[in-house]
Image (spheres, rainbow, N blue to C red):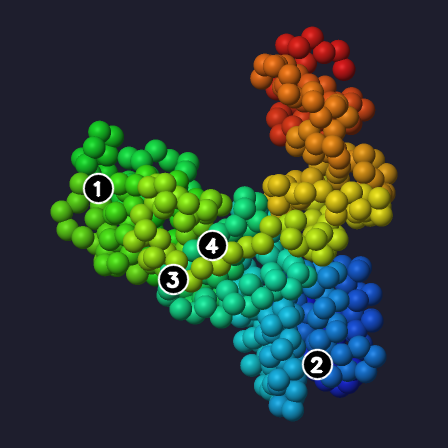
């Protein structure tokens, strides 16, 4: 797919020259003479990169940058500036610009910067789970605390120090880990993530450190572990506090010595892997309870980062709503929907125990439920009973009911929400139509 670039410059000669030079690289190029014209073009189609002059009448480049990040957060931005405004360009980098070019510049320099920015974007997309959605793994925020956190994370990314990221479930700990990797010198090397809670102790050891042929029953070949696969890159240890105590000692040695021992191996293997660990638990409480080694904590906690919960980032809710709404509409091939003021107020008053992950899922369901052009409070179907989202009384789940009955209630309530549309209900419940049909038959539901 041909990449699209928008050139924004108030000088016609410069605008035309840059556009011609870029088009020779095989890009689809459009131009705008000012910020307002650029915004109008962005509302009509998506641009992978916006190249804009810093000093322009009507709207300067920094102001336009803010508009771009609000309207199309997944678009990259490169600023063109003269030596006299280099400080402004550096400040703009902190506000979200991807790079800047100093005047005068050659077209070779211009093309190199464009290729570097787009290559970085390609790498970010490849590291995400869904390559068809640009910047699915991007952190978007307008909150000042989050902005400071990202600036600090970017400043320490160039080091090799271990990082410990703490925060509630769904706040974006893995996103922050990937962000650090992308901003580091290791960006072109592997980023490997492993969930320490998802595997039993014996299997986790083999997954982390690898094993030799014949090390145990079923080990028919030698296998490299995640440490080796992430060599020269980054290894993220998700939910580190769930790792068994006895395995923590082996992890500590790997970090301290820069070498690992495969299961059944005779000789240590040298590795150069950066470690980023994450947890949603109070790690100091885990140490106090004898669940986590204090010496390992000190090794991991060289650079501590804590992500604030969404309930402390209420100013991000309108911004995130617009971002996820646009992405969900694109994914579900729908025209862009609007969020009613009542629905926005509803979102701002929710406690968000599931944080940003819960928020994104809720918007996705709302897009599937909405039949018109505006999302209303009744389209916001939450995962659980609370006083703001449920039709049933808050005491309904306090009764002694079976899982079988809870499942039946969930199916019935979902079908009511979608007026009996089985396709939408199955999508919301994340099951196949066939499974839903079988459940309806099992529960003798005629809807």
Q: In terms of secondary structure, where does tag 1 sit?
A: loop
Q: In terms of secondary structure, where does tag 4 sit?
A: strand
Residue 316 image position (x, y, % from top left):
69, 55
Q: Is residue 385 left or right of residue 44?
A: left
Residue 163 image position (x, y, % from top left):
42, 59
Q: Toward which corner of the image does residue 5 lie, by quadrant? A: bottom right
Residue highlighted by disc 1: 263
Residue highlighted by disc 3: 302
Instruction: Using a 10 Å C-alpha cutoff, classify the residue at mark 4 as few (fewer than 14 neighbours), some (14 to 19) or many (20 or more).
Output: many
Quadrant of image for the C terminus: top right
For image coordinates 30% across by 41% down, the residue present is 245
Quadrant of image for the N terminus: bottom right
Q: Are marks 1 and 3 in contact (CB under 8 Å)?
A: no
Disc on res. 406: none
Q: CA distance from mark 4 to mark 2?
A: 35 Å
Residue 381 image position (x, y, % from top left):
73, 33
Residue highlighted by disc 4: 165
Instruction: Using a 10 Å C-alpha cutoff, classify the residue at mark 1 as few (fewer than 14 neighbours), some (14 to 19) or many (20 or more).
Output: many
Of the image marks 3 and 2, the number of the one nearer the N terminus: 2
Residue 131 image position (x, y, % from top left):
57, 50
Q: CA distance from mark 4 to mark 3?
A: 11 Å
User: Would you say residue 439 is visible in this rendering?
Assistant: no
């Amino acid at each position: 797919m041909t990449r699209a670039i928008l050139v924004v410059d108030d000088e016609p000669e410069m605008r035309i020259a840059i556009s011609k030079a870029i088009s020779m690289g095989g890009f689809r190029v459009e131009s705008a003479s000012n910020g307002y014209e650029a915004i109008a073009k962005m509302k009509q189609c998506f641009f992978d990169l916006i190249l804009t002059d810093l000093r322009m009448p009507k709207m300067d480049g920094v102001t336009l940058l803010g508009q771009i990040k609000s309207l199309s957060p997944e678009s990259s931005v490169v600023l063109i500036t003269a030596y006299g405004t280099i400080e402004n360009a550096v400040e703009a980098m902190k506000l979200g610009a991807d790079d800047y070019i100093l005047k005068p510049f050659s077209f070779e320099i211009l093309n190199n910067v464009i290729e570097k920015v787009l290559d970085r974007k390609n790498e970010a997309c490849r590291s995400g789970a869904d390559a068809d959605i640009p910047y699915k793994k991007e952190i978007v925020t307008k909150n000042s605390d989050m902005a400071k956190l990202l600036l600090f994370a970017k400043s320490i990314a160039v080091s090799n120090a271990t990082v410990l990221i703490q925060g509630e479930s769904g706040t974006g700990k893995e996103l922050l880990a990937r962000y650090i990797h992308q901003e580091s010198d290791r960006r072109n090397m592997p980023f490997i993530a492993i969930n320490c809670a998802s595997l039993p102790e014996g299997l986790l050891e083999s997954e982390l450190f690898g094993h030799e042929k014949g090390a145990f029953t079923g080990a028919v070949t030698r296998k490299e572990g995640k440490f080796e696969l992430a060599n020269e890159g980054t290894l993220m240890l998700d939910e580190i506090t769930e790792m068994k105590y006895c395995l923590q000692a082996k992890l500590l040695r790997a970090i301290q010595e820069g070498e690992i021992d495969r299961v059944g191996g005779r000789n240590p293997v040298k590795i150069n892997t950066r470690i980023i660990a994450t947890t949603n638990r109070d790690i100091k409480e885990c140490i106090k309870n004898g669940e986590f080694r204090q010496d390992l904590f000190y090794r991991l906690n060289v650079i501590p980062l804590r992500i604030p919960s969404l309930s402390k980032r209420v100013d991000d809710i309108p911004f995130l709503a617009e971002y996820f709404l646009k992405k969900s509409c694109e994914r579900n091939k729908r025209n862009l929907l609007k969020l009613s003021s009542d629905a926005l107020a509803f979102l701002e008053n929710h406690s968000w125990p599931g944080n940003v992950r819960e928020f994104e899922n809720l918007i996705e369901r709302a897009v599937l439920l909405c039949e018109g052009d505006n999302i209303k409070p009744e389209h916001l179907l939450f995962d659980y009973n609370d006083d703001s989202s449920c039709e049933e009384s808050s005491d309904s789940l306090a009764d002694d009911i079976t899982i079988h009955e809870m499942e039946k209630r969930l199916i019935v309530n979902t079908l009511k929400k979608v007026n009996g549309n089985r396709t939408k209900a199955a999508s919301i419940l994340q099951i196949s139509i066939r499974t839903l049909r079988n459940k309806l038959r099992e529960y003798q539901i005629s809807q």
